Amino acid sequence: MFFFKYCVATAACAVFLTACDGRLRSARQAADATGNPEMYRLVEHYKDDPEKLTAVAFLLENVAGHEARTFELVDSAGNASGFSLYRAGATSGRYQDMLDSAGLRLRRRTLPDAAVLTADYLIRDIDLAFDSWKNNSWSRLYSEEMFREYILPYRVADERISDWRSFLADRYRPMIDTMSAPRTVENVAALVISDIQKWYRYDSGVLTLETMPTPEEAYVYGKGECYSMANMFVLGLRAVGIAAATDVIPVWGTSRGGHAEAAYFDEYGNPVTLTTGSNLGAKPVRVYRVRYSRQHADREAAARGVSPFWEDVTALYTNTSDIRIPVDTTAFGPEERSSLGLAVYGSRSWRAGVMADSVSLWPDGESGRPVAHFSRIGRSILYMPAVVRGGYTYPVGEPFTLDYKGNIAYIRPDTSHRITLHLTTLLTDTVVFRPDDYRLLYWADGDWKEHPGRVETNPKNRAAYLIRDVPGRTFYRLHDRTTGRDYRNRPFTTDGWWIQRY
């Protein structure tokens, strides 16, 4: 019996030592791949700590592609200045005047993490991350995988490297120690988010020269846009041991621009999105969660027009559909198949929304034409099959609407079918409407056409407006010739008296 127990114990030790050797070997290989001696020193520091060694291997195996996209301010001789733009009065429209007055200029910099990270920085950051995970009651149920992906990383996007974890942990530790509510993930997250909202507020005119300022700079500057604010929430949550990530909407389907939101995970690993479903400001084509680990190969990510570190989480925010759409392959060359996608309308032009998963050049049985396949795309959106060529988006198929149930309705303009377009349900009291300033544009033959008719007052109701003899079965824009903008910035369709904006 003694001999049997001895053999079992010996075998267990052998397995453990083999596993440790495997972790150490993997970590050393990952360090060697960076070409940075500091990373090898990092590995050796943790060689006798299997848990942290695994974390180091995770960071180094995924470090390729992570970088800081930033800038520095230099004088006329090219010497770096200590001047900071993150100060009162600095906006996207005024920062150049501030630089000119100080005799400085902006120099863009891209700093790959693999080349510039130091062992001392990562050792401190890793130890703080483990401390926040192991020593906070609300964090202990997180799995190792959840910890590595959503608490451990030293960065959240492509911001400058900083000691954000110390700054934010030091700020929130006293607040958490004195909070009266139970110390749950939900309550601690609410405390952190509420505090950040007090000193870092939304402002559309802020500096956007880099992804975000450091937390110290943000505290002084006091304002940011949605992407930097979401990232700041994530840093604050991670600093206190709450797993969190930034969710990115690259382009809205029914509004201009894009958006970003923060999401955190409860004690059991379930995502809690701060803005969901009908509470979103518009309809998203796709929503991506920013992770530290690589989700796509570089070539695949480039073909899809996304970051290799983005994970598709659209279905967490809205209903989605998998669809097959006929396309006109005579409108683009074989080399452009990878740039085929669905575009959405915004800012007076078509913008690429999502790239095709695949394109079949064999005629489809239903349409008799080649088809493109798209998966997990948002609903209640007007889409246009298109290719991206030289930075511009060109239609290569029939536009269609994908309604909230997932039904597809193709839009086939019929200039012989004329209607009276009633504008009552389009107009709002919040937007001043001067009928003489507007002209109607409609979609036909792959382009926008101007309708010669003018906006008239409805003879039966002086508060209502209409346009006569309008081509039907298409979609429209009400364009202000004075400002160059569209009314409410959106195209729309009509079904009798009802107007649907997209």
Image (cartoon, helix red, strand yellow):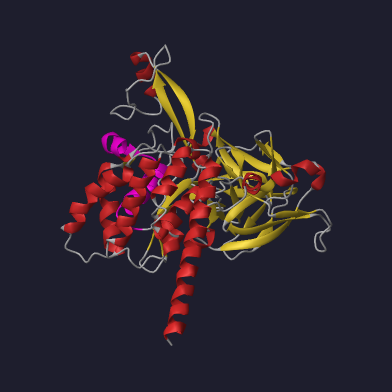
186 vs 69, left or right, is left
Residue 8 in magenta? no
Q: Position of residue 67 (x, y in %)?
A: 49, 38
Residue lying furthest top: 77
The image shows residue 2, relative to residue 179, as above or below, that is below
Name the one closer to the observer, 54 or 468: 54
Instruction: Indicate the quadrant where residue 94 lies.
Output: top left
Residue range highlighted in magenta: 216-242
The image shows residue 170, relative to residue 479, as above or below, that is below
Name the one closer to the observer, 320 or 159: 159
The image shows residue 79, relative to residue 16, as above or below, that is above
Name the one closer to the observer, 413 or 349: 349
Name the one closer to the observer, 119 or 10: 10
Q: Position of residue 183 (x, y in %)?
A: 24, 64
Q: Is residue 29 visible?
A: yes
277 vs 88, left or right, is right
Residue shown at 42%/50% (left/top)? 153
Residue shown at 49%/69% (left/top)? 15
* Quarter of the figure with the N terminus: bottom left
Q: Main secondary structure of the magenta part?
A: helix
Q: Position of residue 23 (x, y in %)?
A: 49, 58
Residue 217 in magenta? yes
Q: Is residue 289 visible?
A: no
